[in-house]
Amino acid sequence: MTKPLIALAALSLAVSAAGARTPARVLPPPPLTIEDVADIALTEDERAWDFVEGITTEVGPRQAGTEAEARGRAWAVAWLKAHGFQNVADEPFLMPTWVPGEPGRAEIVSPFPQSLAVAPLGDSGSTGPEGITAEVVMFKSVAELVAAPDGSLKGKIAFVSNTMTRTQDGSQYGFAGPTRWVASGIAASKGALATVIKSVGTDDHRNPHTGGTSFPAGVKPTPAGALSNPDAANLERMFKRAAGKPITMRLVLTPKDLGQTESGNVVGEIVGRNPYLPPVLLACHLDSWWNGTGAVDDGAGCGIIAAAAMNVAKTGAPLRTIRVLFAGAEETGLWGSKAYSAAHIAEPIAVGLESDFGADRIWRFDSNFRESNPALHRRIAAAVARFGVSSGSDVASGGADLNIVRDQKGALIDLQQDGTRYFDLHHTPDDTLDKIDPVQLRQNVAVWTQVVGILASEETSILTGGPVPSAPPMMKGK
């Protein structure tokens, strides 16, 4: 008999002698590390998709302060509870509420009669259902509009054209954004009956990009709308071909001011082991404009942060509590962010992060503690490098819904998403689920899982690296 057969026979005798009462001991699998969970999320995690698919399908557009936004909050509360979050709540607040009214209409009456695609801008006034008809005056930039003499636009419609181009970091928004943010108010202060702008966006569809505008104190809001980019370009060509003849437009925009209505912030937690350490705050916003389903802006962001928080919990209870903030009424004035800070300003936050720039891949990591806590900055940068994320040198400023962290002068992180196509979709009817790439969405979840896992395990101050009290002052020494 060969040695292997002799060994096998001996093993059989041993098993027979021991009987079936002593099965081989099965060792438990080793605990998952945060690296394990993040790597798994890169290819398998579908919970961010589940969130954004669910809210866009079952709720749809969620205009701030409306019944639709309230349904969105109720849906989000139920989803968080169903997925194991604790301390889930809808924290209400009141806010001034603007709604768009009937679909806007714009048409050139002369010299080249035709319709143009237009959408009203948030917080603008109404023409009334009968509309207004007036001569259009074109400005190539906000600077040109500012230079116009006072009173020179009396009885006229101002048209401000300013082309935005695609960038990975979205920096062109800072260049083109004032066309929407302030042009209406400037034109109104110079006597304009109304304002139309070239959409602040990078697409070439006949989809106007809406968004908020503003008016200076003491200036009554006037009608204001965004033309689709192709229609704005067409209007520019009309001015070239009109050879000095006046261009007349009929404009019908009927938004309404509903006064104070209720919105709210939805919150939930993965509760940490040490309740005395300040929590890690993950933010997004739940509302959207009325003209899209809010998939890219910002249903995906809420799905990303929630999935990341749940992933960290797979490794066991984190040291710090992870709190998610689904802010309400961001689009119309950061009302949720302001309300959350006012209500919780006395509660220290360890660090804040927000996902609100779509669902395409994260390509850069920035913090505001690169100099004050370089070891932690380097550790996070090294941990996310395997996902194709570089370490940036910009000082993170945090997302729009992180007012509480800025008010506390706390630690902030920006996980920069690729914004190359974001402004093709931003505030348009094209903001729908089919625009989200599931592969890139999972990369977001993986990166967020890795970063949040590191932050939630830190015993020292995120901002400075110094010690953090582990118990309230009154308990020290007892």
Image (spheres, rainbow, N blue to C red):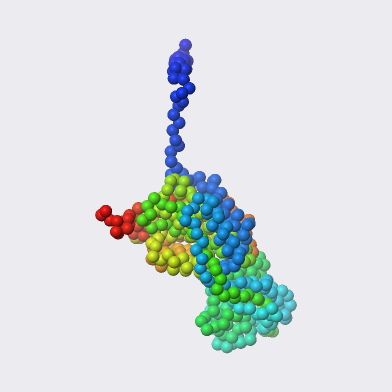
- Residue 137, by quadrant, is bottom right
Count of picture labels: 0
In the image shown, does 160 or 352 lie closer to the viewer?
Answer: 352
In the image shown, does 321 or 137 lie closer to the viewer?
Answer: 321
Q: Position of residue 43 (x, y in %)?
A: 54, 46
In the image shown, does 349 or 423 lie closer to the viewer?
Answer: 349
In the image shown, does 37 or 77 lie closer to the viewer?
Answer: 77
Position of residue 358 relative to residue 238, above or below, is above
- Residue 281, by quadrant, is bottom left
Q: Position of residue 278 (x, y in %)?
A: 38, 58
377 horizontally vs 388: left or right: left
Res. 220 visible in picture: yes
294 horizontally vs 113: left or right: left
Res. 365 visible in picture: no
Q: Residue at x 43, y 46 (%)?
A: 316
436 horizontally vs 472: left or right: right
Position of residue 428 relative to residue 273, above or below, is below
Q: Position of residue 206 (x, y in %)?
A: 67, 67
Q: Position of residue 73 (x, y in %)?
A: 56, 61
Q: Residue at x 64, y 69 (%)?
A: 208
